[in-house]
Image (tube, rainbow, N blue to C red):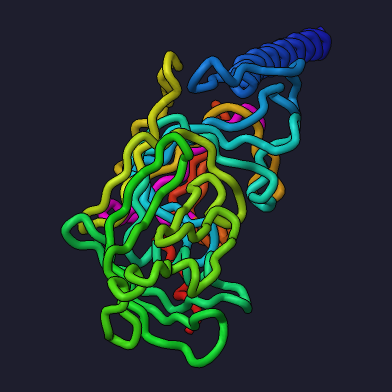
Amino acid sequence: MKRLISLALGALGLLGGLAQADGALERQQRELALLRHGWFQQSPPAPGHAAQRPAGVRDSGQDGVGLLLHNVDMYFQGGIGFHAPQLKGWLVPLEAGAPIDFDHPEAMRIEVVEGEVILSPQQLANLFNQHILAYPQSMLRDFAMHSAGGRLQVSGEVRPLGVGPWLPLRLDGAVSLDAQAGLIDYQPDQLKVLGVPSYGAMSLVGLQLATLVELQRPGATLDGNRMRLDYRKVFPLLGIDGQVDASWLDEQGLHLRFAPPPGSAPMRFSPPAQAGQSYIRLQSGDLKIFEILITYAQVLLKAQAADTPLTFSLRDYRKVLATGLTQVNEDGTFFMSVPPYAVASPPL
């Protein structure tokens, strides 16, 4: 009898344990269901990029990823880039339905909605030396730039008509915005070759800078004495859409201010409290980083050093992020603390 009672109690205990296990498993599944609901919850920063396709686990249905740059040094390749005090917009794939793939930046574009970028004199020089003038037939080379008093001073070398020796060149002039054409114009009113002022003499005989050198590059042309830059096409790797409504020069460099389209809703991002003073926020849509697909993106890349802006390079993003500290929260938010990154010096 005692043995029977003991077996009965053991069976009851086992049943009770199984019931508790079933209860714990059910609670776990309920919690997982709630988390999944959060993981697959779209939160676009503006209504214009709502889902275009039925959403699923591996496709949010939205084309593009919301982009917020806050106090970031953004580079495309090498030393070509700008500083963004604040920039809001979208990373948009050239192929509808494709995720934003950081290993293929040429397959996307930046659609700027509002904000400002600053190209320092060194970044402007890098843009010319590493990209615009970097082709075998170039008649201009080795630009160095300085900004003072609202004017841009350029020194370099010129090879008139593409023949003969390289000669020292000095340019000095103002920068203006042709808002209707979407072009940045640099029109020097002082030109020196071999250290001898020549602009006045050239004007007397009707010659212009364009008669001495040719410049026909994507996003950069020479029209008479004006050097014209199309900010939408002049950067390598990818294009930039958006409307620049103001441009000016100061000691920091060339400022470009983007204005939101008339009547557009303001973009609203939700960076976490721990974002700090310098970060990139990627919000909603689908993206690939290190060949990892992140759907319904909630990504924050923040500067590891509190007193140094985040430096991010599209071409070398793997090197930038390789030594960062990564954290993924239960709600699917992806954080990375990014250490300082030294941009490669331009080739000598």
Q: In this view, does 52 lie to the left or right of 346?
A: right
Q: Which residue is drawn at 28% across and 51% down?
A: 306
Q: Which residue is drawn at 42% across and 81% down?
A: 157
Question: Who is closer to the viewer here, 124 or 336?
Answer: 124
Residue 233 in the image: state x and y as whole percent: 56, 49
The quarter of the picture where residue 94 lies is top right
Q: Is residue 5 left or right of residue 76?
A: right
- Up the image or down, 238 lies above or below 263; here it is below
Residue 296 forms part of the magenta stretch: yes
Residue 256 in the image: state x and y as whole percent: 36, 44
The quarter of the picture where residue 149 lies is bottom left
- Up the image or down, 193 lies above or below 17; here it is below
Residue 232 forms part of the magenta stretch: no
Residue 136 in the image: state x and y as whole percent: 63, 78
Q: What stretch is highlighted in magenta?
A: 295-312
Q: In this view, does 290 lie to the left or right of 242?
A: right
